[in-house]
Amino acid sequence: MGKLKQYKAAILSIIEEHARNKPVNLEDVDNQIITDEERGHYQLVSLGWEGRAFSYAVIYHFDIKPDGKVWIQANNTDIDVAEELMQKGVAREDIVVGFQHPAYRPYTGYAVA
């Protein structure tokens, strides 16, 4: 399996696994997986109703850039999703924590860009 195919499979595996976890106190909120494989965008979002209020939140957002790097654009959980990516075969040097300011990326232990 090529690197990009492996990275796509790793991202989708993580997103699908986490999409199955739904808070029991939010019966009218669903998780949705949104992918644009042609352009390398992958998201897990939750949306629905919390009482009378509409709820929409991006849980994860990943991009695979043309250079093969996996960018974590959003991680609104307490899970170390970069570690999960590495466990699924994504190389540390190919992971960019995109939501960190570029000045702080060298301190993340992952790629800077």
Image (tube, rainbow, N blue to C red):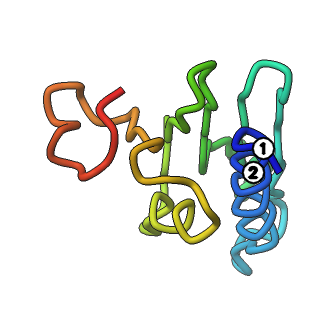
Picture layout, residue 20 above or below residue 82? below
Q: What is the number of callouts on the image?
A: 2
Asked if disc 2 and disc 1 are in contact, CB closer than 8 Å, the reply is yes
**Left or right: 63 with respect to 5?**
left
Q: Residue 99 carries which label?
A: none
Nearer the observer, 63 or 79: 63
Q: Which residue lies under the disc numbered 2?
A: 6
Q: Residue 95: horizontal and vertical position, in percent?
A: 45, 44
Q: Which residue lies under the disc numbered 1?
A: 2
- Where residue 27 sits, quadrant-wise, is bottom right
Neighbour class for label 1 at 10 Å: few (<14), some, many (≥20)?
few
The C terminus - image quarter: top left
The type of residue carrying mark 1 is Gly
Q: Residue 65: horizontal and vertical position, in percent?
A: 59, 23
Q: Distance between the residues labelled 2 and 1?
A: 6 Å
Q: What element carries label 2?
A: helix
User: Residue lying farthest front?
Assistant: 1
Q: Residue at x 41, y 38 (%)?
A: 96
Neighbour class for label 2 at 10 Å: few (<14), some, many (≥20)?
some
**Left or right: 43 with respect to 84?**
right
Q: Residue 10: horizontal and vertical position, in percent?
A: 71, 57
Q: Which residue is drawn at 69% across and 47% down?
A: 7
**Left or right: 74 with respect to 53?**
left
**Left or right: 46 with respect to 33?**
left
Q: Residue 108: horizontal and vertical position, in percent?
A: 23, 49
**Foreground: disc 2 or disc 1:** 1
Q: Residue at x 37, y 35 (%)?
A: 99
Nearer the observer, 12 or 30: 12
The type of residue carrying mark 2 is Gln
Picture layout, residue 24 above or below residue 29? below
